[in-house]
Amino acid sequence: MVYETLQLEIITVLEALGQLRESPEFELCQISEKKPGVLDELAAERATLLEKESAELEKQAQQLARKSRSWPERRQAGLAKPQVRVTRAYTTWNPKKK
């Protein structure tokens, strides 16, 4: 009985070890042990990508803010607020005139 319990425990540990070795975290750990500065390099690359993405999103936000400020002007000029129509396959944007 003790022998079977011990065998089951060994199998469980071996399976867990196999899952660990297949994980991306383990691979990254192995790489960082072989090349100590790699995590700093990866972090710097990721920070650069995030800064670029943030700048692009900020640009898009400013464009949307300019468009939304023009809506009251459009209404005063006799134009309706842009209408969005959602269908099953796609969304269309259609500014309707009064």
Image: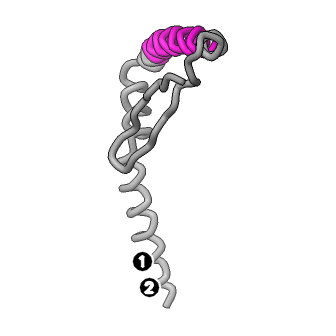
Report how far apart the C-alphas of labels 1 and 2 lie in the structure: 5 Å
Q: Secondary structure at mark 2?
A: helix
Q: Is mark 1 in CB contact (under 8 Å) with mark 2?
A: yes
The stretch of residues the image draws in magenta is 43-69
On the image, which quarter does residue 25 sit in?
A: top left
**Residue count near mark 1 (Cα–Cα under 10 Å), binned few <14, some 14–19, many ≥20:** few
Q: Which residue is mark 1?
A: 7
Q: Which residue is mark 2?
A: 4
- Please name the residue shown 45% across and 64% down the image: 13
Give the answer, above or below, for where 84 lies relative to 17: above
Picture coordinates of residue 51, whole percent (x, y): 51, 10
The front one of 45 and 35 is 45
- Please name the residue shown 46% across and 20% down the image: 39
In the image: residue 83, left or right of residue 14: right
- Please name the residue shown 48% across and 26% down the image: 96
In the image: residue 28, left or right of residue 69: left
Number of on-image labels:
2
Picture coordinates of residue 53, whole percent (x, y): 47, 15
